[in-house]
Structures are given as structure tokens and as C-alpha cells.
Amino acid sequence: MLKTLAQTWPLLLGVMLLMVGNGVQGSLLGIRGNIEGFGTYEISAVMAAYFVGFLGGTTLAPEMIRRVGHVRVFAALGSMISAVLVLYPVFLDWTAWAIMRVIIGFCFSGIYVCAESWLNNTASNETRGQALSAYMIVQMIGIIAAQGLLAQGDPSGFTLFIIPSVLVSLAFMPLLLADTPAPTFGTIKRLGFVRLFRVSPLGCAGMLLTGGIFAAMFGMAAVWGSMAGLSVAQIALFVAATYAGGLVLQYPIGRLSDRMDRRLLILILSVIATVTMLIATFAPLPFSVLLLVAVLLGGITNPLYSLLIAHTNDYLPKEEMAGASAGLIFLNGLGAIAGPLATGWLMEVIGPGGFFLFMGLLFAALSAYAAWRMTRRAAPAETGTFTGLSPNASSLAVGAVIERKN
């Protein structure tokens, strides 16, 4: 692991700074929007806009990289992110924010593709697994650290918008000055959706549902906290707890998935999450218990993403796995666009509890569908090895994981 870190530390440091910048603006906009008097549904549209851009970037960024190269795409998208981050407090209008969030989402998607291809090129076959694990851990640490920065600042001022812009700008220094050559970029051909659904109905439906859950968790937590009367520090701690849960529970859940029917594990986790979300919706919980809810929410949602990809790949030959994963990521992105919008509507109707109720309903749907699918066919005789993946990962990182495992 030390050798891997020595080879990849410039990239990992850059990614961590990027995630700090992205994590701050993700939570900050929900709080600042409430301060500026934006409606809940207006803020939810702003949050959903990020995933519109992210999905577009997943589709278009690879072609941009093939045309002009990693370095130019990296520098151009990074400059755009830094510029947009400091423009939020200048244009205090939710429609302007939504447009800027589309741009930010597109740029971050392209940045992730660049970074992951660089990482894949730098690591050898022997170290690629460790490098990808370090990459996912660094992403989580960056977002958790962002919440600490948010808790120390004033969301009504300019500073918390300027600091992420600076961090994003600094993130490109170690990446662009690294002495590793820019990698070649291959194409991942997506498996057709009809074929993909026939192979794994649960994988397709599950990725669509977990996309909505993750986007609600990532985009609307700060909005919920503001509506519920939490302080900025409490909101930051709640968001940090969701990512800490994902970081801590990813490995033990992955170990379990290699020893049992993945569908049963998906069912169990979804039922636990459903019950937890319903309790949080209807019971007045103290903040200390809400932190436990956050840990469970993040600790279940993040591994579910990896579980569904692993479950789908269990039914595929290795040459189709990367293409299937690209299709699953696209479905996850579609669900992510709808997640904040539906959550915002529910919060408008029933209040802050709509935040947990929406995720509870999606977890309940996933539970029911997983239980039904277990009656339709037997579990595969052999399964692949689980590898933890972040919902922020591009199809390139997923493809690298599959290549390493096969």
C-alpha cells in the first residue's frame, strides 16, 4: 500500500481537495438557499440540476478527452468549476443557481473521468486494486472534511464560496505537475438496456432507486436540516455522519456479500433502511439519535450501489461487465435527477419528515422487488468478488475494477 501511495499521492491529494470543494458547495447551497428565502421545491430543483449535468458529463466527457486530451479537458473544466463556485453569491436567484449547478455537475463528471483514467494508467495490475480503494477512501474523507469546513464558516457571507474555489484551483497543481504521462483513453460500449434488464432486472431497478436515494441524501440533507431548525454545525455533522457510515460499513457488508446470496443481503439492508427512515419520519428523535440514523443511511446506501453492480456482473461473462456497468451508472444518474425533486415536493407537502419518507419509500420498493426476484430464479452458482465503489465513480473506474477482478 505504501508503494501505491508513493506513486499516486499527487492524484489522490488533488482528488481529496476536489471533494472538499464539492462537498462544501453541496451542503452550503441548501443552507444559503433557505437564508435567501428560496422555496423548498426551488432548492430541490437546484440540487437536481447537478445530476443533470453529471449525467451529461458521463456521456460527453469521454469524447472531449479523446479529441483534445486529458490535460486540456482537465484544465478547462477545473477553471470553469472555480469560476462558477465564486459566482453563486453574486447571482442570488434559484434559476441562475440551477444553471450553474448543471455546469458544475458536468465539469465534475469530466474531472472524475480524467482523474480515474490517470489513476488507472499510473497503477500496475498488481497495485490497481489498492489504488482504486485508496481513491474511493480519499473521496469519502474529502467530503467529510468539507463538512468540518462548513461548520466553521458563515453561510450568509462570501468566504465559504471562495474557499472551495481556491481548493479546486489548488487541486490541479499536483495532478498537472505529476511526471506521469497522460493516458490513452478507451471506449466502454454500453450494453443495451433491453439486454441489461433481461440479465438483471433487480440490478436495473435497484440502480434507478438507489440513484434517487443517494441524490436525496447528498443534495437535500442540508435543506432538511434548515427546515428542521438545526444549526449549521449540526447539519455539517449530520452530512459527515452519512459519509462516515459509508466509509465504515462498506468493507463488512462487502465481506458478507461474498458469502451469501447478494439479493438476500440487498433485501435485509433495504428493510433495515426502510424501518429506520420511517422511524425518523414520524418519531421526534434527539440529534444524537439522528446521527445514528445518518450513519445507517450512508452505511447502507453506499454499499448498495456496489452490491447491485456486483449482483448484475454475477450473471454476465467478463467481456460484457464493463458495458453493463456503464448502463447501470446511467440508470443511477436518471434516478438521481428525480430524487431531489421528489424529496422537495414531499417536504413542501408534509414538512421536514418528507426527507426521510421519500428515501423510506424507495427502500421499501427495493425491498419488495428484491424479495420478489428471489422467487423468480436461483442465485448464481458462482459469484465475483465485491469491491466497494462510490456513487461518484465514473464508468471508467468501474471498468478498471472489473478488469482487475478478471
Image: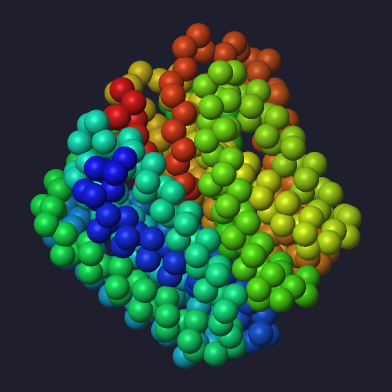
List the single residue furthest toward the front: 2
**Number of marks in the rendered image:** 0
Judge whether 192 appears above or below 140 on screen.
above
Q: Foreground: 89 or 401? A: 401
* Quarter holding residue 365: top right
* Quarter holding residue 354: bottom right
Judge whether 351 appears above or below 119 on screen.
below
> Residue 156, position in %: x, y?
59, 88
Tell me the quarter of the image containing the C terminus.
top left
Is residue 187 left or right of 142 when viewed as pictured? left
Is residue 393 left or right of 216 when viewed as pictured? left
Q: Is residue 198 visible?
A: no
Residue drawn at the location 71% of the way across and 67% of the way down: 224
Residue drawn at the location 21% of the way across and 48% of the way down: 7
* Quarter holding residue 377: top right
Q: Foreground: 123 or 351? A: 123
Q: Is residue 238 visible?
A: yes
Residue drawn at the location 49% of the way across and 43% of the way down: 331
Tell me the quarter of the image containing the N terminus.
top left
Residue drawn at the location 62% of the way across and 68% of the way down: 236
> Residue 272, position in %: x, y?
74, 37
Judge whether 253 appears above or below 224 on screen.
above
Q: Foreground: 382 or 354? A: 382
List the single residue furthest toward the right: 283
> Residue 250, position in %: x, y?
54, 39
Q: How is the image coloured?
A: rainbow
> Residue 107, position in %: x, y?
34, 65
